[in-house]
Amino acid sequence: MKKILLPLSILLFALASCCPEPKDMTKDQIDAEKEAIIKVVKDYNKASEEKNFSAMVDILASEVIFFGTDSSEIIRSFGEFKRQMLEQWERYDKMDYGDLVDVSIQMDKKATFASIIYGSSCKITKDNTEKLIFLRTQRTLVKEKDKWVIISGIVGAVQTGDLLTDLLDNNGNPIDSTKTTETK
């Protein structure tokens, strides 16, 4: 038994020594990963705007869970996801997402798991009538086959006041509260 333990211990030590922990990512690598995450979110929004289900599937993980703006809207499978999206797309003629604001991304040190929280305006058009809302959205992403994909998310329509004046400027554009403005 002792004859086996010594070679096994040496082998384990050698394996541990030859496979060091990955080094922390550089700032440039972190920034590149965050840009890739933002691109996935923008691609998802674009696919939704275009009512393009197959483009959305390419951006989603192999298993998903979503929580929508309705308290009963919980999506736990691709079948439910597709059904919900097709029903949603029937309720309006066009949906346009605005720029992402108040973006916050947290990511593990190996860039395999991340969370993004952001806001965006959303203009919904039905029968030539437009409604502008502001959305707060959270997405959780994982790397599958070296590519960021969305595994879960939650969306909430934020409203304060009658015209969302706290969140949109006079032109209907979202206000980025992470940017400071100078006052004179």
Image (cartoon, rainbow, N blue to C red):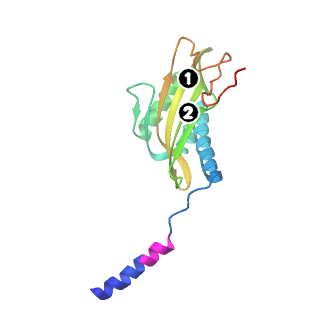
Specify the farthest residue to the front.
Answer: 184
Q: Which residue: 44% across, 40% down?
A: 78
The C terminus - image quarter = top right
Question: Residue 31: x percent and y percent?
Answer: 63, 48
Dot 1 crowding, Cα within 10 Å, few <14, some 14–19, many 20+: many
> In the figure, is residue 181 to the left or right of 64?
right
- Which quarter of the picture shows residue 37? top right
Query: What kind of residue is marked 1?
Result: Phe
Dot 2 crowding, Cα within 10 Å, few <14, some 14–19, many 20+: many
Q: Which residue is mark 1?
A: 134
- Which quarter of the picture shows residue 45? top right
> In the figure, is residue 26 to the left or right of 3?
right
Q: Which mark is residue 118?
A: 2
Q: Main secondary structure of the magenta part?
A: helix
Q: Is residue 51 above or below residue 39?
A: above
Bounds of the magenta span? 13-19
Question: Residue 58: x percent and y percent?
Answer: 55, 45
At mark 1, the secondary structure is strand
Q: Closer to the N terminus: mark 1 or mark 2?
A: 2
Q: Is residue 16 magenta-colored?
A: yes
Q: CA gap, disc 1 to disc 2?
A: 11 Å
